[in-house]
């Protein structure tokens, strides 16, 4: 009779372990999904913030250009092109500041 009890106990223990694993796995998947949802929400917020920033920069009446650490153009506004139409073709993302200045001088600005 002791072996029957031991067998039932081991089966019950194995079932409890399986249920515990299943619950843990379900919780892990739910947490993973929640994290993915949060990332999507934050990415969406970043897109909105970026759009607002670009709209604000473009609404400036003064010319505006932003360069990175390598002195390459990241972005500019329309007012800059309107201010210097002779070199408006140079205002492309990645253009080097040095090239813009040299071409400005070459074109008599």
Image (cartoon, rainbow, N blue to C red):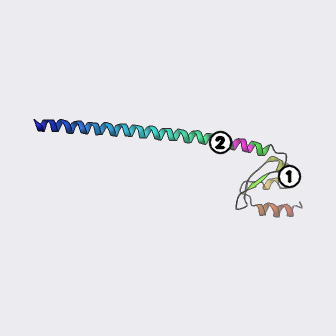
Give the quarter of the image for residue 55. top right
Q: Position of residue 62 (x, y in %)?
A: 84, 48
Q: Position of residue 79 (x, y in %)?
A: 83, 47
Q: Is residue 53 magenta?
A: yes
Q: CA distance from mark 1 to mark 2?
A: 30 Å
Q: Judging from the image, what secondary structure is the residue with disc 1 in?
A: helix
Q: Residue furthest left?
A: 1
Residue placed under numbered mark 2 in the picture: 47
Q: Position of residue 63 (x, y in %)?
A: 83, 50
Of residue 82 and residue 28, the one placed in the foreground of this image is 28
Residue placed under numbered mark 1 in the picture: 85
Residue 88 shown left or right of residue 21 in the figure: right
- The C terminus appears in which quarter of the rendering? bottom right
Give the quarter of the image for residue 27. top left
Q: What residue is rendered at 21% in x and 37% in y?
A: 11
Please state the extent of the stretch shown in magenta in the rendering. 50-54
Of residue 35 and residue 107, the one placed in the foreground of this image is 35
**53 w.r.t. 105: above or below:** above
Crowdedness of circle 1 by 10 Å Cα count: few (<14), some, many (20+)?
Answer: few
């Amino acid at each position: 009779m002791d072996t029957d009890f031991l067998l039932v106990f081991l089966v019950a223990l194995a079932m409890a372990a399986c249920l515990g694993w299943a619950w843990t796995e379900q919780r892990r998947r739910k947490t993973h999904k929640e994290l993915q949802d949060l990332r999507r929400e934050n990415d969406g917020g970043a897109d909105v913030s970026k759009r607002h920033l670009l709209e604000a920069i473009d609404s400036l009446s003064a010319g505006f250009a932003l360069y990175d650490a390598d002195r390459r153009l990241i972005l500019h506004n329309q007012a800059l092109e309107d201010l210097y139409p002779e070199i408006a073709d140079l205002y492309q993302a990645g253009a080097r500041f040095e090239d813009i200045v040299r071409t400005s001088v070459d074109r008599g600005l």
